[in-house]
Amino acid sequence: MPLIKSISGFRGTLGGRAGDNLTPEDIVACTAAFGQWVLNTTGNPKIVVGTDGRLSREIVSGLVINTLRALGIHVVNAGLSTTPTIEMAVVWENAGGGIILTASHNPAEWNALKLLNARGEFISAADGQEVLRLLQQGGFEYAPVHRIGRCEDRTDFIERHVESILALPAVDAEAVRARQYRIVVDPVNSTGALAVPPLLKALGCSCQMINGNITGQFAHNPEPLPEHLTQLREAVVREQAHLGIAVDPDADRLVLIGEDGQPFGEEYTLVAVADYILGLHGPGGTTVSNLSSSRALRDVAARHGAQYFAAAVGEVNVVEKMKAVGAVIGGEGNGGVIYPALHYGRDALVGIALFLTHLAESSKSVSELRRNYPNYFMVKARIERNSDLPLDHIFSFLQKKYKGLPLNTEDGLKIDFPEGWVHLRPSNTEPIVRLYAEAGSPEQARHLAETIRQDIALCQEDANEV
């Protein structure tokens, strides 16, 4: 499998197994291409680098940092940190860009270089294409020995991140402190263990951690889905906690567990936070999520007399749409909350503070708050791309079959059925096709997903016969 190169950066697996593809040579070349792009576009020879807690962090960060230094770039090394923290640190440091070394929710053998521009935001598709062009071109000009960049180690960024959240007018720390919430946190043996507890302590919450040692040996599949969070769910009930919190390895996704041990629903993290923020703004507020996110956000926006807009999947696409429509809150249905008053990036920490403020001011339990929101059910499936049949051919087949229904081709293909919707798109980060289906009942959602699966199988059979 080739190294995955996309608007999300460079991603692959490390090790000596067949198919592993993120080699030291790859890391050096990709870093050099990005460093050259930063120098070419900003003239600013400073880049912030941080890493999540996975096993390969020291090897990858060493290669990245020293490659940047060889280009004459001053590296601000944040070490163990979170994705949202590094995004903000790029701005604080007036840097030309940033690199976050994390494969997000992918298993331990994966790692990646996530690339940030001078605004601390993921680089655009056009900028990504230029980085890829530089990578293909090669021939990088490294600095002479007396102009090698220096490396400055920093450990204060997470503390500053927490302080910035507490200073937000929308975060009512006193209201949260008065509730004295008991919370169990699962940071899956990664850097959320450094960031979530100090935030909760500052908000007057008691925090018990499970899987809190930063070993890189993830205690379970690091994607924060309900089936991977049984230990957290049991701990919340056992400890009689008010709330359970799970984050992914780089702490840009937030998933919540109610006091009864039941998942709040990753799609509903953004819905609840948006409900609170839109309530502050009143009619005229605007919100954005991606095409694969729940209709519940649209419904909640309508309650507040607010507008809802959909964007293509990918944080950079959501951010661009949010800026275009002036959204006050937005994000993705995977637990990703983007609050522009802080910064334009998915941020589990600000999501926690806003959710706890909303919970405290509602005087409800987590399970009671969840019942305030529309009940939709989603199926998230994956289809391996092991066929020679072009994806465009499959999409064309489906468009013809469902031409009488509302169709959206902005990002793959989304079909709106009377009872729900289906979204089919190639992944930005894995060699698969993602299939999402949502409806008013689990049975309807599964039926929609299975219908599309059968359609794809029929399309492939027809192509094989030809």
Image: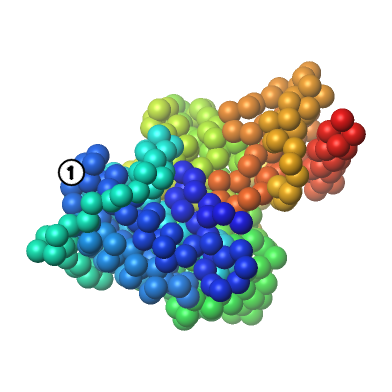
Q: Depth check: give the residue in front, 22 or 155.
A: 22
Give the residue displayed 56% in from the left and 46% down from the top: 428
The C terminus - image quarter:
top right
**Residue 147 spot, x, y in % from top left:** 12, 60
Residue in the foreground of this view, choosing between 294 and 244? 294
Image coords of residue 122 (percent x, y)? 39, 45
Would residue 465 be visible to someone looking at this image? yes
Q: Which residue is mark 1?
A: 43
Q: Position of residue 11 (x, y in %)?
A: 50, 56
Q: Quadrant of residue 166?
A: bottom left
Q: Residue at x 27, y 48 (%)?
A: 36
Q: Nearer the viewer, residue 298 or 206?
A: 298
Residue 324 in the image: above or below residue 265: above
User: Which quadrant: the N terminus?
Assistant: bottom right
Furthest residue toward right:
465
Query: Left or right: where does residue 175 sit relative to residue 253?
Result: left
The kind of residue tagged 1 is: Gly
In the visual, does 341 lie left or right of 13? left
Callout 1: SS:
loop
- In this picture the colour scheme is rainbow
Q: Residue at x 82, y 46 (%)?
A: 446
Quadrant of the image occupied by residue 435: top right
